């Protein structure tokens, strides 16, 4: 029993120290980082700020990548539309940070990554996709240009 009380007291002290730390304060300023834009409601009033093609050497255009912006949440994220049989990796970047989201085939080929706070900084997105194991050139990639502001 004494061990449990000591562990609880140490845990409480650690939480108190973290709550007052600069890292905790910084995290509080960016509450939507690495969150799903549609589960948080940020995607409800979002708009597309950059669009580009997802291309494959063997198959040409295999989809579209969009950099999204939520003025309500001051966040960006990347959305794609590609073959529903594709899987891959969606990334969003801002100056000094990034988020990576891996998606599986399905969802009608529409997928999106998590958000990053990006108010008054540059942001951009990228994606890599593959289908049928990527054999025979069945893979592609795309990236948006930077959106700054």
Image: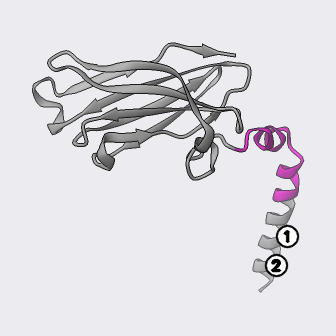
The prevailing secondary structure element of the residues shown in magenta is helix
Residue 9 numbered mark, or none: 1
Q: Is residue 99 visible?
A: yes
Please, what secondary structure does the residue beneath circle 1 have? Answer: helix
Q: Give the quadrant of residue 73.
A: top right
Taking depth in this image into account, of 66 and 34 the one nearest to the observer is 66
In-image side of 149 versus 11 (left or right): left
Q: Give the quadrant of residue 37.
A: top right
Q: Is residue 30 magenta?
A: yes
The reply to whether discs 2 and 1 touch (Cβ–Cβ < 8 Å) is yes
Q: Name above or below for residue 77 compared with residue 2.
A: above
* Location of residue 56 in the rendering, given as x and y in whole percent from the top left corner: 22, 20
**Which segment did they paint magenta?**
14-31
| Label 2 sits on residue | 5
* Location of residue 146 in the rendering, given as x and y in whole percent from the top left corner: 55, 14
Q: In this view, which residue lies farthest toward the bottom?
A: 1
In-image side of 87 versus 94 (left or right): left
Q: Residue at x 48, y 39 (%)?
A: 113
Distance in Å between CA atoms under marks 2 and 1: 6 Å
Please, what secondary structure does the residue beneath circle 2 have? Answer: helix
Dividing the image into 4 quarters, which one contains the C terminus? top right
């Amino acid at each position: 029993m004494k061990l449990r009380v000591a562990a609880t007291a140490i845990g409480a002290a650690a939480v108190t120290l973290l709550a007052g730390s600069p890292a905790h304060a910084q995290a509080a300023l960016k509450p939507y980082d690495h969150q799903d834009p549609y589960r948080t409601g940020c995607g409800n009033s979002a708009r597309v700020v950059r669009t580009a093609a997802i291309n494959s050497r063997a198959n040409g255009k295999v989809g579209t990548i969009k950099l999204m912006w939520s003025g309500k949440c001051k966040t960006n994220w990347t959305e794609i539309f590609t073959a529903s049989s594709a899987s891959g990796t969606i990334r969003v970047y801002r100056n000094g940070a990034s988020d990576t989201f891996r998606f599986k085939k399905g969802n009608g080929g529409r997928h999106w990554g998590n958000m990053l706070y990006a108010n008054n900084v540059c942001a951009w997105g990228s994606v890599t996709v593959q289908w049928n194991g990527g054999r025979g050139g069945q893979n592609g990639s795309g990236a948006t240009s930077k959106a700054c502001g």
